[in-house]
Amino acid sequence: MDTGKTGALLRELRREKGLTQEQAAEQFRVSRRTVSRWETGSNLPDLTILMEMADFYAVDLRELLEGERKAERMDRELEQTVRKAADYSEEGKRRLTRRMHLLFLFGVLISAVYAVLHFFDLADGALGGFCAGVSMGVMIVGALMTSRQAARIQAWKWKLCSRKKRSEDG
């Protein structure tokens, strides 16, 4: 996939509609800067946004992905498959968000326990040290998983898991 070609096509389609980057950003609920990054090819929209764009600009999703217009139309089965994949991707994002919320709530709870221990001058004991350590760990994991590096971390984790599974199987 050539991100430069896709970006150029997105810019062309936006201009054909007579839209500014700001108006396109409002249409797809993103910032103007994000639209600019898409059009320069430095970043690409999520699959769900690409499907919205295909509908909005009345082009095939395949055309957006390949960065060039095609005469033939995408068959319905392929489009349904792509939509199912996007739904699956969205479900994964919802699960991750749910996990992050639970992690955050757990961190707040442990921090509250530590604050109570500190208030009663009991924070120097083993329980206080445990609460402080867990609170710090939750903050670090939360910061990493909400950073730009989250996808790399997750890919690394999957790579480690698959390597471990292969060593157990073989």
Image (spheres, rainbow, N blue to C red):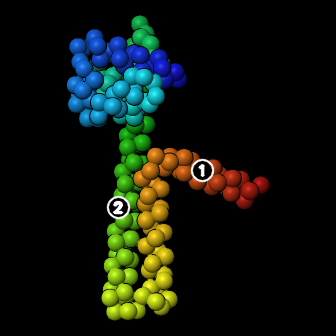
Mark number, residue 135: none
Q: Quadrant of the C terminus?
A: bottom right
Q: Nearer the viewer, residue 23 or 74?
A: 23
Q: Which residue does the image show at 42% across and 88% down from the upper left?
A: 123
The local crowd at label 1, few if under 14, some if 14 to 19, many if 20 or more residues have their Cα within 10 Å, is few
Which of the 4 image quadrants contains residue 12?
Answer: top left
Marker count (numbered): 2
Picture coordinates of residue 30, whole percent (x, y): 29, 35
The answer to whether marks 1 and 2 mark residues whose Cβ atoms lie closer than 8 Å is no
Q: Which residue does the image show at 23% across and 18% down from the upper left?
A: 19
Relative to 31, 146 lies left or right: right
The local crowd at label 2, few if under 14, some if 14 to 19, many if 20 or more residues have their Cα within 10 Å, is few
Q: Earlier in the sequence, mark 1 or mark 2?
A: 2
Q: Which residue does the image show at 33% across and 22% down from the upper left?
A: 54
Which of the 4 image quadrants contains residue 27?
Answer: top left
The residue pinned by badge 2 equals 101
Q: Amino acid at mark 2?
A: His
Mark number, residue 156: 1
Q: Is residue 60 visible?
A: no
Q: Is residue 39 visible?
A: yes
Name, please, the residue furthest toward the right: 170
Give the secondary structure at mark 2. Answer: helix
Q: Which residue does the image show at 35% across and 61% down from the upper left?
A: 101
Q: CA distance from mark 1 to mark 2?
A: 22 Å
Q: Amino acid at mark 1?
A: Trp
Picture coordinates of residue 95, whole percent (x, y): 39, 54
Picture coordinates of residue 91, whole percent (x, y): 38, 47
Picture coordinates of residue 53, whole percent (x, y): 32, 24
Which of the 4 image quadrants contains residue 58?
Answer: top left
Relative to 151, 26 lies left or right: left
User: Where 19 falls versus 159 (above or below)?
Assistant: above
Give the secondary structure at mark 1. Answer: helix
